Image: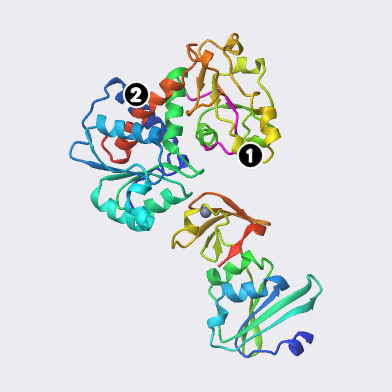
Amino acid sequence: MNAKSLISITDFTKEEYLKIMRLAEDFEANPNQKLLQGKVIATLFFEPSTRTRLSFETAINRLGGKIIGFSDSSSSSVSKGETLHDTIKMVSNYADMIIMRHPLEGSARYASEVSSVPVINAGDGANQHPSQTLLDMYSIIKTQGTLDNINLFMVGDLKYGRTVHSLLMAMLQFENPIFNFIAPAELAMPNEYKILLTSKGIRYFEHSEFTDIINAADIIYMTRVQKERFIDPVEYEKVKNVYILRNEMLKNTKENMRILHPLPRINEIHTDVDSNPKAYYFTQAKNGVYTRMAIIAHLLNLK
Amino acid sequence: MEKHLKVSAIKDGTVIDHIPTKALFKVIKILKLEDCSQMVTFGNNLDSRAMGTKAIIKIANRFFADEEVNKIALVAPHAKLNIIRDYAVIEKKVVETPKEIRGIVHCFNPKCITNAENITTSFEVLSDKPITMKCFYCEKITSENEMIFF
Ligand SMILES: [Zn+2]
């Protein structure tokens, strides 16, 4: 339908990315702006994700909006066999915006076709989670002052990790990014992305382990290496401790280098990093609230 | 010539030639020829200098719009159409791979919403030799050997 939705990170232009960054900064400086007064926002979580839901609901509350919805499908009509189509049709008659998370890929795109109000994709299976990417970008611009000329290290599961793929796509809109990929061979960055980078003349480097190459990083983006991604458990045992970031490794890294992680972490960032000023992942999560306020305000033309 | 002996000629209609033998029944399905009330004749495993063997379909009194016939490019990318009027070929066409495919194939991704609800599939064709296409919904890329036809 005609309402403007955010389903995939590539739905937004560079101008829109920059507008979201400006709005997020504005909301961070002044978080209680009652732009959603009198509006109802539906948060439909067909699978639970407490972290993402709380972040969105905090954003809505700070904007003065009211929330309807459910936090997992067992407590909704979906458990009675209602189709996604019918749920979205009904809810889009009640609410001014739908924020949804769903285990099936493409569900949010489909919902945006069915809905008469804007839809924000808060995760559709392994496919997209664009508000995560925008908050990652906000964390980069906040700590580096720019999204241009960023030397971005991506570490861990680069094969299945949707956050790294989306961030890569978004950073292509900016000047002269450099990518460094650190991953085991079985979780390497997929070829389609490497082909894309080559075709755009963008530099990237692949490494199979952590070394002092990280001293060149502006941003180290850590992800989880999950056991269930490995066909052979022996392979997992071999690599599980190779991609752990420890405080002593950060000694010679750049002063304003920052470590990002979409959270939750397992063991890939040692807790001794947490007190290092270069550890940014908890602030990054907080940035998510301002970024989501910005996305909501933008899609509803409130700013 | 020899072809006429194997699959009888039609007065008016469309002849689809150079169909890979394995694709014959898929072409019939894609063009919904099961529901066609006109005379449809086909031959399979015919000799072909270019392809080794091939299939051919002749449909009397039917003329296809380009977007209709281009759907068969998914299974018969080298198919050629002869438009027949009064036993003579008045026009020859080759099929072209469309930029977008709607329906016809399932998304190969079992976690795609199109496999869970009643949704017409939609794909953006990324390349045609070999065919790769991206699901409009789940954004996964289906390649030629992963295609599942309705
Ligand atoms: Zn799909």
Determine the chain carrying the residue at label 2.
A
Residue B115 in percent (x, y) is at 50, 58
Examine the image and state in which quarter residue A34 appears. Answer: top left
User: In front here: A203 or A30?
Assistant: A30
Residues at badges 2 and 1 in contact (C-beta under 8 Å)? no
User: What secondary structure is found at the residue carrying circle 1?
Assistant: loop
Q: Residue furthest left?
A: A38
**Main secondary-structure element of the magenta-colored stretch:** loop
The image quarter containing residue B106 is bottom right
Image point (71%, 87%), residue name: B7
Query: In terms of sequence position, does the residue under pointer 2 or pointer 1 come before the other?
Result: 2
Query: Which residue is under mark 2?
Result: A25
Q: Is mark 2 within 8 Å of ligand 1?
A: no
Q: Quadrant of the C terminus of chain A?
A: top left
Q: Position of residue A274 (x, y in %)?
A: 49, 15
Q: Nearer the viewer, residue A153 or A52?
A: A52
Residue A170 to residue A115: above or below: above
Mark 2 burial class by Cα count in 10 Å: few <14, some 14-19, many 20+: some
- Percent across and percent down for residue B18 are 71, 73
Tell me the tag on residue A190.
1
The segment highlighted magenta reads A147-162
Mark 2 to mark 1 CA distance (whole Å): 33 Å
Label 1 crowd bin: few (<14), some (14–19), many (20+), radius 10 Å? few
Q: Chain of mark 1?
A: A
In magenta stretch: residue A136: no
Residue sitting at x 47%, y 11% = A275
Name above or below for residue A10 compared with residue A143. below
Q: Amino acid at mark 1?
A: Pro
Q: Closer to us: mark 2 or mark 1?
A: 1
Q: What kind of element bears circle 2? A: helix
Count of number-bearing discs: 2
